[in-house]
């Protein structure tokens, strides 16, 4: 596929984005709670969260007011990349429990009115997977073509200049085959060759395994990596600043290329269509939500969801990674309003791959002692922006990003790029359930896989339960209110021009209904002119006053008005 064809795909997607069909399906604009399995709740006493631990906390998750939950990988794995290096898709990693526990979790979630999704990693496996062992053994075995193999370049070096997202060459030399193997992430995560129909058929079979148990759908890992250029052409160079959507610190070498041939290639679309066909085999159809990373996602996302034969929705990292100034953010929101398909995108302010939102996006407010207000403001924004939302565990407690010393690092990405990049362990620290229990009630083990940061005791859930002004109580009020405004799930969005510095304001509109959302990110009071008078605040926090079409907002105050 040529570069021009790639652009044609994009133009096609944007011109075909259309309006969502009516009535909206449950997943459109839904709010999901992301459970990071390792760090949620340990009922087995081994220092890791587990499946039963999630089942035990389902009432808590339901009472937050979310539509469903997504669980990060719990499959057997050597855990080089915390479970995203899967060695068997049809099992459960011992410390997390058993397949029967998973069935119980699905059934219990449904009994509580929650939808439940798991992670599905279609693009790569662990190098401990039996498929890879066989494929790597020789050039002429039955699975010889199941991964992406290439001969060395004429000088003996790697076949092209591709770089792993985690830094370093994306090619690993495998002596048994005297060939290079492509691996877009860790050396131990070889990419599957999904163009091979036999491989794809096996992957689809793996998908059905959990769907057959009643699972409502999958969060699809790294959809930008489902395929790659068939001629293995080298990427052109880029200035690091041209790649703001890429994580891994300011100097990650991955940022120094335009990822034309190794990420987000058009050949992924036919693969995605096959995945969708499997989701459609079920009644009701199962749902596929894609993670789109490493690329300029706001522009590229629509092509993954148009035509009703691709993914149902996608989420990306643009809100997380482009936070240099609020002006940049407002520009980006404007861009997103134009490009994204209403109801088919999800707003994510943090997840298990990024720092905690309040520390990352609002460091000044945190330093000034307003962490709690800043956390509420971000949650409000997430709940009123166009699209659905994924709330990462602990965001409902307003947790801040802890610093993890080098000796305690677990994340291989951090180890590769330290000290440039602190990595993902901070956001992955366990949930503080009780302020006065060992490990804040996360585990009875003396050796949790990651320590509960000391400061987390003061944000513990039990303390927030008793405090009506807590972020937890606020989150419950917010999501309860959101449910009373169904248009928020699918309405289009129009970002206001000419708002004061440090203000984000937009209008959501659908079928004659409208809602205006205004937030003051600054520490000083502001006044905003609204497009009309006669508006009434429906949900707000902080100091606000409305006089005709003038809205005054105190520091970090916000309001939704109709
Ligand atoms: C995306 C996952 O969210 C991340 O945690 C993982 O490291 C990469 N995919 C590679 O699987």
Image (cartoon, rainbow, N blue to C red):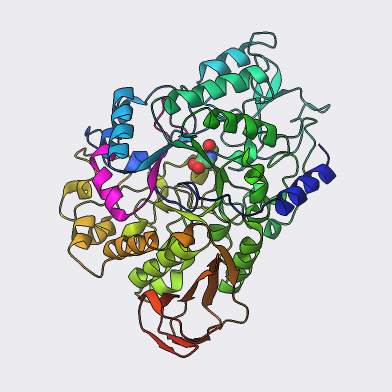
- In the figure, is residue 222 to the left or right of 407? right
Q: Is residue 390 left or right of residue 168?
A: left
Q: How many marks?
A: 0
Q: Position of residue 363 (x, y in %)?
A: 45, 69
Residue range (magenta): 54-81
| Residue drawn 59% across the image and 20% down it | 201
Residue at x 68% of width, y 15% of height: 177
Q: Which residue occupies the foreground of this view, 42 or 453? A: 42
- Residue 1 shows in the view: yes
Is 60 part of what is drawn in magenta?
yes
Q: Is residue 60 above or below residue 311?
A: below
Name the foreground residue: 538 vs 266: 538
Which quadrant: the C terminus? bottom left
Residue 429 on the magenta span: no
Which of the 4 image quadrants contains residue 309? top right
Look at the picture and state if 450 lies above or below 139. below
For the view shown, which residue lies furthest in the left direction?
436
Q: Residue furthest bottom?
A: 547
- The quarter of the image holding the N terminus is top right
Q: Nearer the viewer, residue 223 or 510?
A: 510
Reply above or below: 533 against 92: below
For the view shown, which residue lies furthest in the top direction?
141
Residue 142 vs residue 79, the one in the foreground: 142
**Relative to 385, is 248 above or below?**
above
Evaluate whether residue 123 shows in this view. Answer: no
Residue 221 location, quadrant: top right
Residue 404 in the image, given as x and y percentages of width and height:
39, 52
Question: Residue at 77% across / 51% down in the picture?
Answer: 11
Please provide percent x and percent y for residue 416: 54, 43
**Residue 331 location in percent, x, y?**
63, 69
């Amino acid at each position: 596929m040529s570069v021009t064809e790639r652009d044609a795909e994009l133009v096609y997607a944007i011109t075909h984005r259309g309006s969502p069909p009516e009535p909206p399906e449950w997943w459109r604009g839904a709010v999901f709670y992301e459970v990071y399995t390792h760090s949620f709740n340990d009922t087995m006493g081994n220092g890791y969260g587990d499946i039963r631990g999630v089942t035990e906390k389902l009432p808590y998750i339901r009472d937050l007011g979310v539509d469903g939950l997504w669980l990060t990988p719990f499959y057997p794995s050597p855990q080089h990349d915390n479970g995203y290096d899967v060695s068997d898709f049809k099992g459960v990693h011992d410390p997390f429990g058993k397949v029967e526990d998973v069935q119980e979790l699905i059934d219990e979630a449904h009994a509580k009115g929650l939808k439940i999704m798991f992670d599905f990693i279609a693009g790569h496996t662990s190098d401990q997977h039996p498929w890879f062992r066989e494929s790597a053994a020789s050039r002429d075995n039955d699975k010889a073509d199941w991964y992406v193999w290439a001969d060395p370049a004429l000088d003996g070096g790697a076949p092209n200049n591709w770089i792993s997202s985690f830094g370093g060459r994306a090619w690993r030399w495998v002596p048994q085959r005297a060939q290079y193997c492509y691996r877009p992430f860790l050396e131990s995560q070889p990419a599957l060759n999904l163009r091979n129909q036999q491989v794809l058929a096996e992957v689809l079979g793996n998908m059905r395994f959990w769907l057959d148990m009643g699972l409502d759908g999958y969060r699809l890992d790294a959809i930008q990596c489902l395929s790659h250029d068939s001629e293995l052409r080298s990427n052109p160079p880029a200035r690091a600043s041209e790649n703001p959507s890429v994580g891994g610190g300011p100097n990650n070498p991955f940022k120094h290329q335009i990822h034309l041939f190794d990420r987000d290639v058009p050949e992924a679309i036919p693969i995605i269509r096959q995945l969708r066909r499997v989701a459609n085999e079920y009644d009701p159809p199962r749902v596929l939500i894609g993670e789109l990373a490493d690329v300029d996602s706001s522009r590229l996302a629509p092509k993954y969801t148009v035509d009703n034969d691709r993914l149902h929705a996608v989420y990306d990292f643009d809100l997380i990674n482009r936070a240099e100034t609020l002006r940049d953010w407002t520009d980006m929101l404007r861009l997103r309003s134009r490009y994204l398909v209403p109801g088919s995108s999800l707003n994510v302010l943090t997840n298990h791959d990024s720092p905690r939102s309040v520390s990352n996006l609002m460091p000044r407010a945190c330093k000034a002692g307003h962490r709690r207000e800043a956390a509420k403001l971000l949650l409000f924004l997430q709940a009123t922006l166009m699209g659905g939302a994924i709330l990462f565990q602990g965001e409902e407690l307003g947790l801040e990003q802890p610093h993890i010393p080098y000796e305690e690092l677990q994340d291989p990405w951090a180890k590769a790029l330290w000290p440039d990049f602190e990595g993902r362990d901070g956001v992955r620290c366990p949930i503080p359930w009780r302020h006065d229990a060992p490990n804040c009630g996360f585990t009875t083990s003396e050796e949790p896989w990651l320590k509960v940061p000391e400061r987390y005791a003061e944000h513990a859930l039990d303390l927030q339960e008793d405090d009506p002004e807590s972020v937890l109580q606020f989150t419950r009020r917010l999501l309860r209110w959101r449910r009373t405004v169904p248009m928020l799930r699918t309405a289009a969005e129009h970002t206001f021009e000419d708002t004061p510095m440090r203000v984000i304001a937009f209008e959501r509109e659908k079928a004659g209904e409208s809602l205006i959302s205004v937030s003051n990110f600054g520490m000083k009071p502001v006044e905003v002119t609204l497009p009309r008078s006669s508006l009434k605040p429906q949900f707000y926090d902080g100091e606000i006053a409305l006089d005709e079409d003038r809205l005054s907002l105190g520091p970090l105050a916000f309001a939704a008005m109709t």
